[in-house]
């Protein structure tokens, strides 16, 4: 039997959407107010979901305490109250869009999740704007 186990978390972070190789006019045209040179912040809501077989031995797909600890160590401690552009090496050459942030989170957690389980990241940038990434 398969089941999906999900854990919610959150972090606050600032970012600026822009390309260094574009001039200000093009960055403004493409990214609008998200291109603010003084950055802007979001209260990100994160849902990490793991789908897999329920263990006959433990009754778990994944231990939620273990999942919680992984999220704290590899995501919250790394991203919370940071300027993604300036403080997080993953975004030195990667635009910190919600899409790219979700991929970075997936890549940070994937090595710690059983290879036979599916990992899915849902990242809310605002209550109405969110991205889902599952490694494809």
Image (spheres, rainbow, N blue to C red):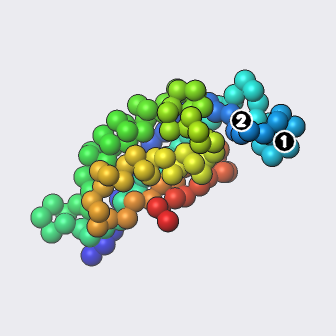
Direction bottom: furthest residue: 1
Residue 80: x %, y % from top left: 49, 30
Residue drawn 32% across the image and 65% down it: 117
User: Sequence order check: which comes first, mark 1 or mark 2?
Assistant: 2
Direction left: furthest residue: 57
Q: Are the residues flagged by discs 1 and 2 in contact, CB closer than 8 Å?
A: no
Residue drawn 56% across the image and 34% down it: 92
- Please say if 122 is above or below 41: below
Residue drawn 46% across the image and 47% down it: 105
- Mark 2 is surrounded, within 10 Å at the Cα level, by few (under 14), some (14 to 19) or many (20 or more) other residues, namely few
Where is residue 115, by image quadrant? bottom left
Residue 10: x %, y % from top left: 49, 39
Instruction: Tell me, for residue 20, which label it has, or none.
Output: 2
Residue 118: x %, y % from top left: 37, 64
Element class at badge 2: loop
Q: Is residue 34 visible?
A: no
In-image side of 29 versus 116 (left or right): right
Residue drawn 69% across the image and 30% down it: 40
Instruction: Tell me, for residue 26, which label it has, or none.
Output: 1
- Say which quadrant the N terminus sits in: bottom left
Viewer-nearest residue: 50 or 91: 91
Viewer-nearest residue: 120 or 108: 108
In-image side of 84 versus 59 (left or right): right
Element class at badge 1: helix
In-image side of 52 versus 19 (left or right): left
- Please say if 135 is above or below 13: below
Instruction: Tell me, for residue 8, which label it has, or none.
Output: none
Q: Is residue 59 visible?
A: yes
Q: Cα distance, mark 1 to mark 2?
A: 11 Å
- Mark 1 is surrounded, within 10 Å at the Cα level, by few (under 14), some (14 to 19) or many (20 or more) other residues, namely few
The total number of labels drawn is: 2
Residue 21: x %, y % from top left: 74, 38
């Amino acid at each position: 039997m398969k089941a999906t186990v999900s854990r919610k978390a959150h972090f606050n972070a600032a970012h600026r959407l822009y390309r260094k190789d574009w001039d200000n006019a093009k960055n403004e045209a493409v990214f609008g107010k998200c291109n603010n040179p003084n950055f802007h912040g979001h209260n990100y809501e994160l849902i990490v979901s793991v789908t897999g077989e329920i263990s006959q031995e433990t009754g778990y797909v994944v231990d939620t305490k273990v999942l919680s600890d992984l999220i704290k160590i590899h995501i919250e401690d790394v991203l919370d109250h940071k300027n993604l552009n300036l403080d997080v090496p993953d975004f030195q050459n990667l635009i910190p869009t919600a899409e790219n942030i979700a991929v970075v989170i997936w890549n940070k957690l994937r090595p710690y999740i059983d290879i036979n389980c599916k990992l899915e990241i849902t990242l809310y940038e605002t209550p109405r704007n969110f991205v889902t990434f599952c490694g494809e």
